[in-house]
Image (tube, coloured by chain):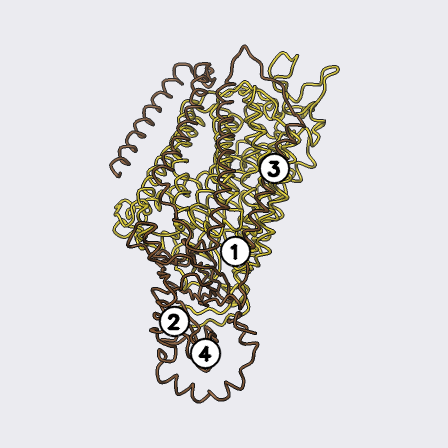
Chain colours: A brown, B yellow
Amino acid sequence: MLDLLIFVGIVLGIIAIAKVVKVLELSSNVKGENSYNITDKENRFQAFLMPVFLVVYFAFIIWQVVKWGDRVLPVSASDHGVIIDQLMTTTWIIIIPVFIFTHILLFYFAWKYAYDKNRKAQFFAHNNRLEIIWTAIPATVLLILILYGLSIWNDVMEPLTPEDNAVEIELYARQFDWTARYPGEDGKFGESSVRMIEGVNMLGLDSTDAKAWDDKYVKAEFHLPVNRPVQFYFRAQDVIHSAYMPHFRAQMNCVPGMITRFNFLPTKTTEEMQEITGNPEFQYILLCNKICGAAHYNMKMEIIVESEEDYNKWLSEQKEFLVVEGNEAKVEIQEVEEEEIIEESPEEDTELSLLNTK
Amino acid sequence: MSATHNDNDFLFKYIFSTDHKMIAKQFFLTGSIMGLIGMLMSTFFRLQLGYPGESFPFLETIMGDWAPGGVLTPDKYLALITLHGTIMVFFLLTAGLSGTFSNLLIPLQIGARDMASGFLNMLSYWFFFLSSCVMIASLFVEGGPASGGWTIYPPLSALPEAVPGSGMGMTLWIVSMALFIVGSLLGSLNYIVTVFNLRTKGMTMTRMPLTIWAFLITAVLGVLSFPVLFSAVLLLLFDRSFGTSFYLSDIYIAGKALEVDGGSPILYEHLFWFLGHPEVYIILLPALGITSEVVATNSRKPIFGYRAMIGSILAIAFISFLVWGHHMFITGMNPFLGAVFTFTTLLVAIPSAVKVFNYITTLWKGNIKFTPAMLFAIGLVSTFITGGLTGIILGDSALDINVHDTYFVVGHFHIVMGLSGTFGMISGIYHWFPKMYGRMMDKNLGFLHFWLTIVSAYGVFFPMHFLGLAGVPRRYYQNTEFPMFNQMYDINELITVFAIIAAAAQGLFIFNILYSIFKGPRAPQNPWKATTLEWTTPVKHIHGNWPGEIPEVHRWPYDYSKPNAEEDFIPQTVPLAEGEEDQGH
């Protein structure tokens, strides 16, 4: 490829030099007389190139579709992804014919109506009927697309309810890695603040908060049970990141100072997806999709989707915050345990664990 | 208006000129140089993307410790993409495009002796020049230039700890943009005032060429939206330098929690895109205006639907202020707002479709002369369709979830905004070069330039859609961490090869310009047989544009191939014949 590059460079260089010479000749021969006028022959040649270009352009697109078409993301691994993909297909079905039709008209007319000194262009300045047609048709089609798109958008963004029995996960982004936090047995996330980040307590969990003690957090990979809704909460500690899970058609920014949300229902386990893609190495991934600094390009986490039993087994093997934090925190916790339980107010619960409030 | 100083004084003729034609050339020169720098940057980072980790020793020669051992470092990769975006969007396609053609054509096409205020016009250029210098200077400061992407979202852009470029380089970026905005406002106000007040006798609003309509509405967009960017970067400057927290809250970085609270980066995004989206049309409208003029002139046929064209410019401009949220569907913004922005965004497609069909109908039954300007104008219609249609996918919030910030977006906006804007600008240069420099450009170089450019440009940006549909994120230094993206290396390689060809092809254009300025054949009075007023001025520039009285205008600007007329064009200065109807009324 590099050789090709050098070759192309040399060819272009030669063309450029040849042109320089030609231009110099031209200008000395005709001394600036009308050499800028485009002759009929040249005009016809340029006109001829119009349909040629059209064919080359379409052929190039078809070549890409044939060669790379199977590299696009595989079938959606989430429930809502399926309807998003349908909307995508519908949109393609609408825009591809428009693309082909307008391009054919553009380059066909350009070729067909090339200059002919024996002909005069038609003085055709306006036609209200035509204008109305090509305002009304796009307007109608777009209106349908808008209504269809918005109905999908509302479906996708619909919040979960407590009846959904969702798994709750907090994805925590920082330069340059991800951490996933599970609420533990009590089903409630503990309070946290960047001001409490210290040593191994990298999420800044409040060790005086009883809800935090059984929280579990993992790095490098996190697990999801198949066919159970997942409620994600996203946080970031330093700059904006974006949690992008392409196979699930899911993406949400992680913004310092606020908690963002997204939910979906995973419908295919990692194993199933390995079969579908025919790739035994296949893994679902979470990646950062908002420029976040020099190592933005390698901020990743793997997602394992598995059966509910496997998921529960995996989760039970993960260490609780209290154990991670170590003895020092434990002593502190014991001291405050009593008042903490008294002080605990329902408002605080709503902050993170929306679904568990009654 | 007509200057009192001596014309032979080099300083006042070429440097501190208040003549709009000279200022247009100054904008063109500065904008083009910036554009070339931006293009060069893109080939450098394309090398890294096409051949990740491979050593190109000449990169070290040029960039020193940005590319130790000939491999670009990750943070300098971000610096290059940031400056590439900033330079192309603002310096080439805003100041370079509007600055050149609004300045050149507004007084000439409406029949004015100069801009309303020549002095402010001069200041406008000098603020732009200063701003360019500051932006280039930021390449050389410690830590390198701004590296947070051209949108410079805080906190990344607010905290020097977050990325090396957010130190001095970012401060200079803000200073440069502040100067740029001042220059842009001075220019825009001047354009608006000039168009409203200095039209010659008979030049009613509906007899103005579509170029002028486009420049006028562009200037209005600029005046309404750039001040918002100004306030956005001003608040950012406060956050960076004076310890405020407009955009910052709950941040822990470089081993300590910061004393910032209550701010929101989302506020910045709203302010930025309130400019950022109209900015797309600040780039596109002048390009479309130039295309209208070039297509009509070279089809020897009136532009189809003159009033519909004006209406669509106004509609696009109006809607462009109501769509900024489509850049923010997945920021955590309320989904209801997302729905509203989807609705308004897809509406833009209607006036855009009207414009496309009108261009195509203008070609229909025309008598087309394929000048290089015409080729680029046809190219623009093609890129506008191609890029515009994928906008229907990105503007749909539900679909945006999965393609947001992927290469699909990069492909989309480079085609619809980058290529269309550039093609419009290049088309304008080929068309009005005789007016700018009194000489003609070489047509054969022009033909070659066009075909190489359009083929390689599509070769660069079309494959990006496939990368995006495979989920490849933009702004990644390399994809080696992700096997599923890394297998796309051959697509990236192809893109890089085309990018280098595209860049090399611009060498033809530069050579053609430089050669023609000095050695090109002398331009005749009206080389393209056009109807508009600029072709009635003397080929050799004079202050005040017309030696005698300013000509009076009697008809609209598109009387090409009018039935019963002898020639296939009737200049605007020719009075209506008895019983002849003027289309402009």
Chain holding disc 2: A
Where in the figure is residue B232, as x and y percent of width and height?
Answer: 56, 57
Answer whether labels 3 and 2 touch (C-beta < 8 Å): no
Where in the figure is residue A123, as x and y percent of width and height?
Answer: 63, 19
Mark 4 or mark 2, whichever is nearer to me: 2
Image position of B216 with respect to B548: above or below: below
Residue A206 is marked as 4
Q: Which residue occupies the foreground of this view, A335 or A65?
A: A65
Task: Answer left or right for B433 relative to A219.
Answer: right
Report which residue position mark 2 lands on: A217
SS at mark 2 in the image: strand
Please tell me how crowded label 4 is: few (under 14), some (14-19), or many (20+) other residues with Cα within 10 Å.
many
Q: Which residue occupies the foreground of this view, A201 or B303?
A: A201
The answer to whether dots 1 and 4 both sit on one chain is yes
Residue A156 is marked as 1
Where in the figure is residue B71, as x and y percent of width and height?
Answer: 28, 50
Report which residue position mark 3 lands on: B351
Residue type (three-letter) at the residue carrying disc 1: Val
Among numbered discs 1 and 2, the one appearing first in the sequence: 1
SS at mark 4 in the image: loop
Mark 4 and mark 2: Cα distance apart in space: 14 Å
Residue B28 visible, this orientation: no
Among numbered discs 1 and 4, the one appearing first in the sequence: 1
